[in-house]
Amino acid sequence: MAIRNILKASEHNEFLRKKSKIVNDVKSIYDLLDDLWETLHHANGAGLAAPQVGILKRVAVVEIDGLKLELINPIIIEKSDEQVIQTEGCLSFPNQWGKVARPKMVKVETLDRQGNKKTITATDWQARAICHEVEHLDGILYVDNVLEEE
């Protein structure tokens, strides 16, 4: 495992806007998953997507309230109509915060580390983090959704 460099938007904005590629061989990303966890914990974050460490693969990790998720090829299949506006930040935008509206609940289809398809239902902060990381995989940055900066 290794702590990877987190790309900062000011220097790597063009790269962070690229769309990530589907993972076809889950076994090929075990080291990446381990590195994402180590990097996330080192940075004291809630979520981290592969593009943020310079890898354009549809992989992200999220850890909130004791729930640890590895998202491989995630697809949000359902969102609640109810939105919650809360302050959000991003490891690629250090010391920058803004209010963002996110669905209160999401359902996401993903693969786990063994390549098994699973559906996860998340609410509140977990739903927010999943939406944030899935957007990273599509080249969308949280600042694109900021309603008001703090």
Image (cartoon, rainbow, N blue to C red):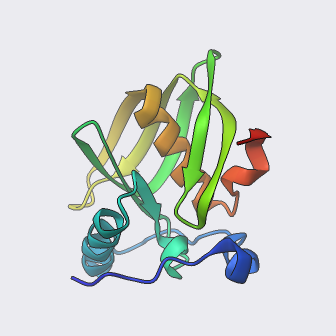
Choose between 94 and 7: the one closer to the eye. 94
Looking at this view, name the residue that lies furthest to the top.
82
Camera-nearest residue between 62 and 21: 62
The image position of residue 138, as x and y in percent, is 65, 60
Q: Is residue 103 left or right of residue 112?
A: right
Residue at left offset 44%, top offset 33%: 125
Q: Quadrant of residue 140?
A: bottom right
Residue at the (47%, 51%) spot, across then down: 74
Quarter occupied by residue 33: bottom left
Q: Image quadrant for the N terminus?
A: bottom left
In the displayed structure, 63 sits above or below 29; it is above
Q: Nearer the viewer, residue 72 or 117?
A: 72
Please state the horizontal and vertical placement of residue 143, each as a whole percent of the image: 73, 52
Position above or below: 32 against 123: below
Residue 100, image x and y in percent?
Answer: 68, 36
Q: Is residue 24 left or right of residue 76?
A: left
Residue 102 lies, in percent from the top left, at: 62, 31
Q: Is residue 11 above or below residue 39?
A: below
Q: Is residue 30 left or right of residue 6?
A: left
Quarter location, residue 56 = bottom right
Which residue corresponds to the image point at 50% horizontal and 65% vertical from the top-left? Answer: 58
Looking at the rendered structure, the number of numbered marks drawn on it comes to: 0
Give the camera-side residue of 45 and 19. Answer: 45
Measured along the vertical axis of the image, is residue 66 above or below residue 55? above
Q: Could you tell me which quadrant the C terminus lies in? A: top right
